[in-house]
Image (tube, helix red, strand yellow):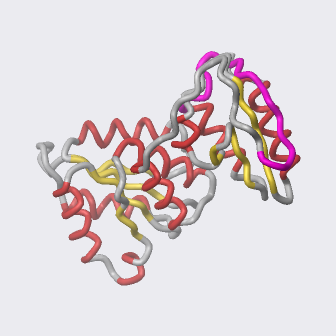
Amino acid sequence: MSVGLVVVSHSARIAEGVVELAGQMAADVAIVAAGGTDDDGIGTSFDLVTAGLASADSGDGVVVLCDLGSAVLTAETALELLDDDARARVRIADAPIVEGTVAAAVAAQSGDDLDAVLRAAESASRAPAEPQHAGEPAAAAPAGPSRTLTLVNASGLHARPAADLVQLAATFDATVLVNGVDARSMLRILSLGLDRGATVTVSATGAQAQEAVDAVAALVEGGFGEA
């Protein structure tokens, strides 16, 4: 089981598209689209949101992502009518719908709990780091084991490879950094803007620091499994 997600949009197509995108990086997470009205119009539906909450909740809770203000109101109304136990397992994220859903999905796929998935979604509202380009020096590594590598895969450190890296980093009892940013944050990794040929410094501290650095380095050197 994992934390589930419900995507509430005024457009069914937008909700479905966001679900499709996030699902590419979180195949084991229940991500449910609740977009449009009951008659496929533009707007939101209390019934669709209520059904989405029930479908996404495996027992570990649900984070709801919304687009416009009235979508939040619809989600809040649906939440108010849940029983106390179900209501306690739902969080409505204050986050952009696309970036927030992707970040939350990767966190849920990594096994994070409800509050951590909510924090991942809401981290999308913060200013990203300046992107680093190929050939620029990587950020200085802190104390602890580190490796400096070159991205060899065609897509660099973008959506699917970034998700693979974040999920791998989450398996270790260590704080893992990539070019100075938290390797468990999907959006911070993406904000680096690292393309093929860019230099990455992987560093870690903690009980499994060396194992984490070695595993992430192997993933990078193996091109993230890309042909």
In the picture shown, does residue 98 fall above or below 119? above
Residue 20 visible (yes or no): yes
Q: Magenta stretch: residue 33 in it?
A: no
Residue 224 visible (yes or no): no
Along the viewing direction, whichever of 34 and 111 lies nearer the viewer: 111
| Residue at position x 86%, y 59% in the image | 207
- x, y percent for residue 69: 19, 56
**What secondary structure is the stretch in magenta mostly built from?**
loop
In the picture shown, does residue 27 fall above or below 107? above
In this view, the residue farthest toward the bottom is 84
Q: Quadrant of the C terminus?
A: top right
Which image quadrant for residue 74?
bottom left
Q: Magenta stretch: residue 153 in it?
A: yes
Q: Is residue 30 left or right of residue 38?
A: right
| Residue at position x 32%, y 40% in the image | 16
Q: Please give the count of numbered marks on the rendered protein.
A: 0
Along the viewing direction, whichever of 43 and 218 lies nearer the viewer: 218
In the picture shown, does residue 82 fall above or below 179? below
Which image quadrant for residue 63?
bottom left
Q: Is residue 34 left or right of residue 31?
A: left
- x, y percent for residue 160: 57, 32
| Residue at position x 70%, y 45% in the image | 177
Q: Is residue 75 left or right of residue 171?
A: left
| Residue at position x 67%, y 42% in the image | 180
Q: Quadrant of the N terminus?
A: bottom right
- x, y percent for residue 195: 59, 21
Along the viewing direction, whichever of 39 and 143 lies nearer the viewer: 143
Residue numbers of the magenta segment? 142-159
